[in-house]
């Protein structure tokens, strides 16, 4: 059983728990097939006029979305990237991605359906249903939609295949994969903020966080940095993370990850400093990224 929890992102809001969905039946044709259909309870007020299915993602909108749209193609590739890089078995669980045309429409919907949620550009919601779960992402078209969807869909994909994802790791991986493919997961803004001389890294402390309120912007940056260190420094560090994720597939409480890095680094703090220095050295001049 996955533990119901709520995760508040500073770039998103991911909700795993009991929220209410209702409505009449909706049938979404599977792209590339003529007979297969997806039966699903639609969400009143959420865009659903047009649908386009790419792998496990079903994009729903009130404006036409085409399978060759850059954003749709990129998100289809994201699925392959995430599961391949993390050596996880791809899931087929459908994730319904409702994309509003404008921010006011999106906000009106959220005010009506989820007045408890604070303003965010995107949300991932896992809704328990009689037959299992309904995985839904909401967002609206803006200049950061692609990146926000990469972030939210990473949460969704991890949720599909792991029994539980520790908060820091969930956000660290989402921050890593939200960066467009080809940029090696380097978040230039995080890197810039982590250059401050008083920054301290403490994975042990980060792993103890379990409350949403503890995930400050500083913790998001640190979570990204640890994930980047493990995936992009040494084969042993990478393997430690992959083994941990493999264990999370069957064991929701695998203990701490930090001790498993003892074989990868003499000092993980020094390894982090060296890794960030190397990333800074390679960072193209003038590179910036949004928070
Ligand atoms: Zn997130």
Image (tube, grey):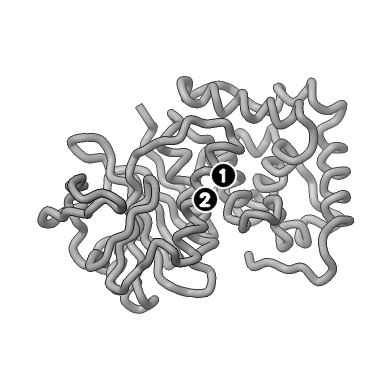
127 is higher (above) or lower (below) than 29: above
Residue matched to label 1: 81
- Image spot of residue 107 (x, y percent): 34, 72
Q: Quadrant of residue 270?
A: top right
Along the line of sight, which residue is nearer the eye, 56 or 40?
56
Residue found at x 65% / y 27%:
257
The secondary structure type at the circle numbered 1 is: helix
Residue matched to label 2: 77
Q: Quadrant of the N terminus?
A: top left
- Image spot of residue 199 (x, y percent): 80, 51
Residue 8 visible in the shown view: no
Residue 125 visible in the shown view: yes
Q: Confirm or deny contact between disc 1 and disc 2 (CB under 8 A).
A: yes
Along the line of sight, which residue is nearer the eye, 73 or 14?
73
Number of disc labels: 2
Along the line of sight, which residue is nearer the eye, 182 or 132?
182
Residue found at x 42% / y 67%:
119
99 is higher (above) or lower (below) than 202: below
The secondary structure type at the circle numbered 2 is: helix
Residue found at x 76% / y 43%:
201
- Image spot of residue 30 (x, y percent): 27, 50
């Amino acid at each position: 059983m996955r533990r119901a929890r709520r995760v508040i992102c500073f770039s998103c809001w991911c909700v795993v728990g009991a929220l209410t969905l209702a409505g009449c039946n909706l049938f979404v044709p599977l792209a590339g097939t003529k007979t297969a259909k997806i039966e699903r309870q639609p969400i009143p007020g959420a865009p659903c006029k047009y649908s386009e299915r790419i792998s496990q993602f079903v994009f729903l909108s009130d404006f036409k979305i085409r399978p060759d749209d850059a954003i749709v193609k990129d998100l289809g590739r994201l699925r392959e990237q995430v599961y391949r890089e993390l050596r996880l078995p791809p899931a087929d669980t459908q994730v319904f991605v409702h994309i509003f045309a404008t921010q006011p429409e999106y906000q009106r919907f959220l005010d009506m359906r989820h007045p408890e949620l604070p303003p965010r550009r995107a949300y991932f919601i896992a809704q328990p249903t009689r037959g299992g779960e309904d995985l839904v992402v909401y967002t609206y078209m803006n200049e950061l939609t692609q990146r926000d969807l990469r972030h939210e869909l990473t949460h969704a994909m991890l949720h599909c295949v792991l029994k539980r994802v520790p908060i820091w790791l969930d956000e660290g991986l989402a921050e890593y994969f939200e960066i467009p493919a080809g940029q090696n997961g380097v978040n230039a803004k995080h890197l810039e903020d982590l250059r401050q001389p008083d920054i301290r890294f403490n994975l042990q402390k980060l792993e103890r966080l379990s409350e949403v309120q503890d995930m400050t912007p500083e913790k998001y940056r640190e979570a990204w940095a640890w994930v980047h260190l493990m995936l992009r420094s040494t084969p042993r560090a990478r393997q430690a993370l992959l083994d941990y994720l493999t264990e999370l597939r069957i064991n929701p409480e695998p203990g701490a990850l930090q001790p498993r890095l003892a074989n990868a680094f003499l000092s993980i703090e020094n390894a982090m400093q060296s890794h960030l220095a190397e990333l800074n050295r390679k960072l193209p001049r003038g590179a910036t990224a949004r928070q």
